[in-house]
Image (cartoon, rainbow, N blue to C red):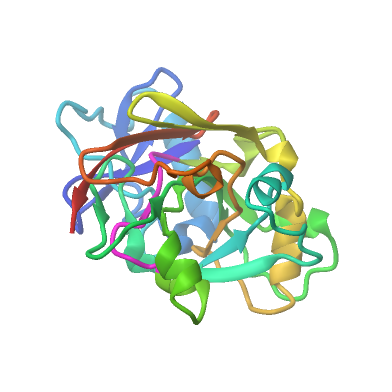
Amino acid sequence: MKLLRVGTAGAERPALLDHDGTLRDLSGIVPDIDGDLLADASALARVRAAAETPGVLPALDATGLRIGPPLGRIGKIVCIGLNYHDHAAETGAAIPEEPILFFKAPDTVVGPDDTVLVPRGSRKTDWEVELAVVIGRTARYLGSAEEGLAHVAGYATAHDVSEREFQIERGGTWDKGKNCETFNPLGPWLVTADEVDDPQALPLRLWVNGELKQNGTTAEQIFPVGEVVRYLSHFMTLYPGDIINTGTPAGVAMGQPEPKPYLKAGDVVELEVEGLGRQRQELKDA
């Protein structure tokens, strides 16, 4: 299923994109798309049954309708740094022996087409297309990558916007360059795991002002999805509604020759993970 949330920011309602591309209202079936829904097999079964029965779910007019983040009440966002062989190479970094972790606050999440704000004082705002993993079952001390995949509810397209000066040159942790407002557009859809045959075979692409900048595949990941979930479960409990941003392929501004083409107000970024939907953001000054 392709689950999403539509409406004004803070007042989104649950919806579904059916096989014909028609937007369907789920608000009569479930209150929201969130961790509670993803952890409730019976509720998900009701959604599936309604989706497969003609006339049950009302159609929504998508004209002018904002698409919000496809997940509400997000728990935590755990991010994996330097998780692609080609991205590590372009930045001159050694291949990590274990996953590099940092966090994004849930309040960085915006809709896939919402405005992204360039922080005040920023000189190095960068782009990163990523595969986002959404947890559907509580994960603690998992024993294998296969168990890790079994705890995934679905996948989404994510934009891990980053301010490199804040992240790398200002001391402390990476988090200060990752948590500026609007720095995690998510969606348009949460695609349930049963529709993704192999999370390690997904093309990712990103364009800036129409120019292709990133053109990679999750096959390049150093630590694949199932292993990332297993690994994280030994350091923290993962709950339904938690998100993992799994890293970005080569092609970020930081990896380009000088002068590096960092983002500025007026730029337009478009990105997609194949099968998980496309985003478009115009940048403005904060």
Residue 136 placement (x, y as % from top left): 58, 59
Say above or below: 277 vs 47: above
Say above or below: 86 vs 83: above
> Which residue is the extreme one toward the bottom?
172
Front-most of 214 and 146? 214
Left or right placement of residue 222 versus residue 136 in this view? right
Say above or below: 229 vs 27: below
* Residue at 33%, 45% in the rendered image: 263
Residue 108 placement (x, y as % from top left): 34, 63
Magenta stretch containing residue 180, yes or no?
A: yes
Front-most of 94 and 207? 94
Which quarter of the rendering shows the C terminus?
Answer: bottom left
> Which residue is the extreme one toward the front?
258
Say above or below: 112 vs 80: above
Left or right placement of residue 142 versus residue 195 in this view? right
Q: Which residues are magenta?
A: 177-189
Residue 262 placement (x, y as % from top left): 38, 46
Q: Main secondary structure of the magenta part?
A: loop
* Residue at 24%, 54% in the rendered image: 117
* Residue at 25%, 27% in the rendered image: 59
Magenta stretch containing residue 107, yes or no?
A: no
